[in-house]
Image: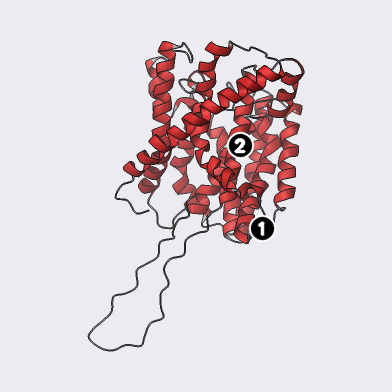
Amino acid sequence: MTAVTRATGAPPATETVAPAPAAPAVSPPAALPSLPSLTGLRWMAALLVFGLHVHNFGYFGGTAGRIVDWAFGAGSTGVSFFFVLSGFVLMWSARPGDRAPAFWRRRMARILPVHLVTAAMALVMAYTLARPAIPTPEQAVANILLVHSWWRPWWQTLDPVSWSLACEAFFYVLFPLLALLLRRLGARGSAALAGASVLTILVLGWADAHHWTDHPLYSFPAARLPEFVLGLAVARLVLLDRWRGPGLEASLALAIIGYFLVPQVSHGYGATTCTVVGFAVLIPAAAVADLKGQPSLWRHRRLVRLGELSFAFYMIHLLVMAAATHLFGTSPHFGPLAGVAATTLTFAVALGLTWLLYEAVECPARRWLLRGRRP
């Protein structure tokens, strides 16, 4: 994560008409500390999603398949982690006085290049490999514009995982207003907002499990907004130095317990209710560990590097797995050795393409789109 500088007013120009008392020296604006542990955690969340898709594509059968189901059946909660983390990071790095158009420009420069390239890859695959299915013109346009998650029949067109980007795009639209409101809240108000967000998630999970809505809430952007707001609220508490949650080890244990509770509830949106509290304390705990220089596994340089690649990996891995069905077949249910080999090959190809996307698309396109802009 790149540390940002808080804007401040420029010091007044020196007057020449008369001597004046010397003004105190004005130090340069201090940059917010970077939080590398959060970048490392991003990679672990991306791995949960990858493991879920290994399970869904049926690479393992028998006992090995049951183990994979136990370990990664709740992998969809990795997306929930991304939503909470997104709110935390954006609130942490928000610039006072930043204009909404400048913020939106930076966010689109961050996600659009990889999104457009993977959407194009998915379209080529649809016409050549029949995976994914050929979208209608309306579906393709909705996907490119990142509004496809608002209508259930369109939510997994082209690159299926891009549905979460439609949610993120909705969050980005609201963020300037939400950040303005959050800055008016003190510690108590931020804590109350965090509690209200958790309560809203629990209510929505209950409503989804009982089919109170016409369509499942899992991919509906408005239903995922409370997770983003929760991230904003806990980030505000850290910024105010009022976070009083458990330490990194206890937070990780709580997140793991919630993760393995998921099979006890309905999958889909209901899984979020099991993990949201654990994620909401793990993220600020990792941030505080970085701020205080406390030990953190997630700060390891290799994990941080992989975390930098996590967005491109998230966007490309499912396309690789869809293409691999022409090699492995649909739901092959391999034995342990063949399943490990198939998973390793798929992972290696996805990671190689991830590096290419990051170095040849994500970074240069972002620099080009933001050229001439203040860092």
Question: Count of labels shown?
Answer: 2
Q: Name the residue under label 2.
A: 45
Q: Do the residues labelled 2 and 1 touch (CB within 8 Å)?
A: no
Q: Which residue lies furthest to the left in this view?
A: 17
Q: What residue type is labelled 1?
A: Gln
- Name the image quarter holding residue 79: top right
Using a 10 Å C-alpha cutoff, classify the residue at mark 1 as few (fewer than 14 neighbours), some (14 to 19) or many (20 or more): few
| Residue under the point 41% across and 81% down | 24
Which x, y percent locates residue 114?
A: 42, 32
- As helix, strand or loop, the secondary structure at mark 2 comes to helix
Name the residue: 56% across, 39% down. 83
**Residue closer to the observer: 174 or 12:** 12
Mark pair 2, 1: CA separation: 22 Å
Q: Nearer the viewer, residue 294 or 369?
A: 294
Residue underneath mark 1: 294
Q: Which mark is residue 276?
A: none
Mark 2 surroundings: few (<14), some (14-19) or many (≥20) residues within 10 A: many
Element carrying mark 1? loop
Q: How is the image coloured?
A: secondary structure
Specify the quadrant of the image occupied by residue 230.
top right
Side (left or right) of 29 relative to 252 = left
- Confirm whether residue 214 shows in the render: yes
Across and down, in percent, residue 62 comes to: 75, 15
Q: Is label 2 or label 1 in front?
A: 1
Q: Where is residue 250 in the image (x, y as percent from the top left)?
A: 75, 49
Residue 76 pos. (x, y %): 62, 29
Sequence-first tag of 2 and 1:
2
Q: What residue type is labelled 2?
A: Ala
**In terms of depth relative to the viewer, which is nearer, 63 or 269?**
63
Residue at 29 percent of width and 50 percent of height: 372
Residue 79 seen? no
Measured along the vertical axis of the image, is residue 312 above or below residue 216?
A: below
